[in-house]
């Protein structure tokens, strides 16, 4: 098994889905019921077997058995989540994640097929003759290529529909940004700039908590770079017709708008884009 690290998570990919985990993580212990089977398995990349760490607490919540442990103990380990429904076996899911520094990265099957196959082989070996293995194999066999082709024309049509939704939100003079980072799931973890050079085609917006407004940052002179803060918004109009909007985070640039990579604004960011338009930045062209 090739070892997955932060350095090879985004090879040939512009971004990856990630989620910040709490200090404690609870993982479901599998139980076969009339509804089906759900479970999470911890795999050690180095030893290529199920994790043998016993530093966890076993808990029951609403009849569901879970193990709770310090998230830091999951560092560099793989999580395999399986979900088989007796009512609809076609929706069976087999998903692999990597945990690094309390962050869970979603590994797309299209880019990490070898990792998925190796995880399945490990589970088959270690759960040999156990009834749950049948459900796990069903979930694995249901895997399909999850690589989404980019349809620029369709994305532009979706963007125009979104702009129409934004129009009724215009002239909103304040909004709350509290949930912007939590609703962002796609990150370019290889792009984590500490400062940036503002230009006619690249603008940085900063949130003022007292006024609950974004302002356009102005450089001291044209050669001065702006030091970025968490939640700064970077609007890049470098390519005509294909603007991008990112939010600065500790994980890398979070994608809020990128037509070329199937990242379209959603209802959670309506107020944000209405404010951007009211600042005079024609992001939604």
Image: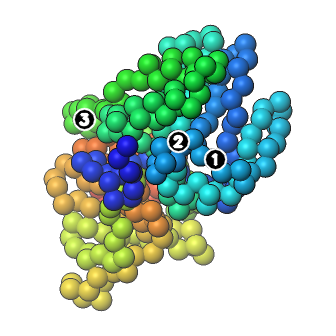
> Where residue 271 sits in the image (x, y, percent)?
50, 52
Who is closer to the viewer here, 154 or 60? 60
In the rendered image, the vertical position of residue 125 relative to residue 178, given as above or below: above
Which colour style is shown?
A: rainbow
Residue shown at the point (41%, 35%) measured from the top left: 118
**Residue 112 x, y percent position in the rendering:** 35, 39
Foreground of the two, 235 or 124: 124
Q: What distance separates the C-alpha of mark 1 from that of mark 3?
A: 42 Å
Residue pointed to by mark 3? 150
The residue nearer to you, when weighing 43 against 168, is 43
Report the residue marked by disc 2: 49
The x, y position of residue 257, in whole percent, is 35, 50
Name the residue that disc number 1 marks: 52
Q: Residue at x 72, y 25 (%)?
A: 31
Q: Work out whether residue 99 or residue 240 is closer to the camera in this orientation and state it.
A: 99
Q: CA distance from mark 1 to mark 2?
A: 9 Å
Quadrant in which the N terminus appears = top left
Among numbered discs 2 and 3, the one appearing first in the sequence: 2
Q: Is residue 132 left or right of residue 112?
A: right
Whether tag 1 and tag 2 are in contact, CB under 8 A, the answer is yes
Between the residue at mark 2 and the residue at mark 3, the CA separation in whole angstroms equals: 37 Å
Q: Circle 1 — which element?
A: loop
Q: Residues within 10 Å of mark 2 (few under 14, many from 20)?
A: some
Question: Which of label 1 and label 3 is nearer to you?
Answer: 1
């Amino acid at each position: 098994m090739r070892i997955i690290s932060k350095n090879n998570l985004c090879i040939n990919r512009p971004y990856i889905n990630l989620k910040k985990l709490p200090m404690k993580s609870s993982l479901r212990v599998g139980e076969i019921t009339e509804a089906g089977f759900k479970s999470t398995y911890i795999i050690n990349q180095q030893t290529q077997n199920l994790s043998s760490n016993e530093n966890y607490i076993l808990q029951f919540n609403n009849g569901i058995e879970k193990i709770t442990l310090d998230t830091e103990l999951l560092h560099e380990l793989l999580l395999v989540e399986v979900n088989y429904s007796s009512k609809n076996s076609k929706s069976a899911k087999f998903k692999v994640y990597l945990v690094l520094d309390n962050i869970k990265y979603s590994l797309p099957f299209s880019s990490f097929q070898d990792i998925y196959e190796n995880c399945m082989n490990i589970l088959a070996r270690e759960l040999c003759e156990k009834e749950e293995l049948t459900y796990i194999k069903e979930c694995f066999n249901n895997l399909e290529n999850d690589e989404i082709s980019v349809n620029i024309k369709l994305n532009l049509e979706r963007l125009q529909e979104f702009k129409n939704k934004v129009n009724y939100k215009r002239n909103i003079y304040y909004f709350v940004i509290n949930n912007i980072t939590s609703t962002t799931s796609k990150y370019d973890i290889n792009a984590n700039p500490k400062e940036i050079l503002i230009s006619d085609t690249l603008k940085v917006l900063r949130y003022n908590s007292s006024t609950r407004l974004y302002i356009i940052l102005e450089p001291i002179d044209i050669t001065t770079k702006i030091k970025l803060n968490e939640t700064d918004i970077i609007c890049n109009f470098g390519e005509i017709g294909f603007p991008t909007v990112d939010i600065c985070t500790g994980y890398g640039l979070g994608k809020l708008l990128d037509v070329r990579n199937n990242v379209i604004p959603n209802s959670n960011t309506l107020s944000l884009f209405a404010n951007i338009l009211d600042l005079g930045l024609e992001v939604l062209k």
